Amino acid sequence: MFISIWLVGCVQLWGQSTGAEEIPLSTHESTQIGIGGYNLRDTYLSPSTNINYTGWVARVLNERMKMVRLADYRVSRQQLINVEFGSTRNGAGTAREYAGFIDYSLGYHYRFTPPLPGLKLLAGASARISGGFIYNTRNSNNPASGKADLDLNLSAMAIYQFKIKQLPLTLRYQAEIPFAGMLFSVHKGEPYYYLTQGNRSGLVHFSSFHNKFAMRNYFTLDIPVSRVTIRLGYLNSMYRTDVAGIQTHVLSNSFLIGFAKEFVAFSGKRLKSNAHRYRSAFY
């Protein structure tokens, strides 16, 4: 319902402009790599709900943001691609679990009137699709658990620009939480081999707060150094499900580092006339 109302409002506001299109709209892009801690539990692989596998996770995170022609150019579009791989082991050190996930999200955020100089507040919605696996080295019959999700999320962001002496810094916090979606899951004790025999009923489940809680908390700090902008980040990710008799959680905390940049796609006379002029979705 929320998404429908939001989309109707966006369509009604489409095309309203105040001449902002005369200034080129830049694309804000960043790529970060990171490493951190991982905590896995999947009762399809380990029937005991008390067994946690802990270890490390490495990830690559790419982000793009751009202003769009909605609500008089007060809406920005954000795309995020996350790829992660983790290695964990149980407390006794007798078994390992490996996990890998990739996800893509597309979101739109409305920008409110700044309450304070240098502070931007944004809120909106996003859609995210993700897939991955958890593999247990000790199991022989059911060694792997597949994961696939499609979520509709609520998203909010705060961006604050400030200075320490003469050094301009940009701090951002973003939170995202799914409120409805679908996910793939076999039933507890059901081998994936059965899928090849035509037993494919009950594999897709509706997900919401009653059987799934997932949240991302994302912090970044942009530091300009010479002609480049270094981005430091921290990503806290929580994923918990209780579906078809299987309880799963994937928890991670990652520290990231990378670069951020702005670029504008135009050339010729327009390039000369708009040198050093662009409208950023982030800064």
Image: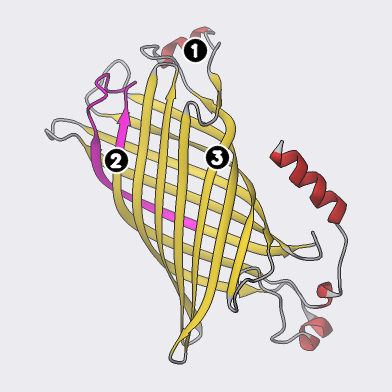
Q: Which residue is mark 3?
A: 178
| Residue 203 on the magenta span | no
What number is the disc on residue 196?
Answer: 1
Circle nearer the N terminus (2, 1):
2
Q: Position of residue 1 (x, y in %)?
A: 72, 35
Decide: few, some or many residues near mark 1? Use Cα within 10 Å; few <14, some 14-19, many ≥20: few
Apparent side of residue 162 relative to residue 249 in the rendered image (left or right) = right
**Residue at image coords 30%, 54%:** 36
Residue farthest to the front? 115
Q: Mark 3 near mark 2, Cβ–Cβ under 8 Å?
A: no
Apparent side of residue 250 relative to residue 271 in the rendered image (left or right) = left
Q: Which marked residue is nearer to the observer: mark 3 or mark 2?
A: 3
Kindly indicate the quadrant of the structure image that contains residue 73. bottom right
Circle nearer the N terminus (3, 2):
2
Decide: few, some or many residues near mark 3? Use Cα within 10 Å; few <14, some 14-19, many ≥20: many
Highlighted range, magenta: 40-61
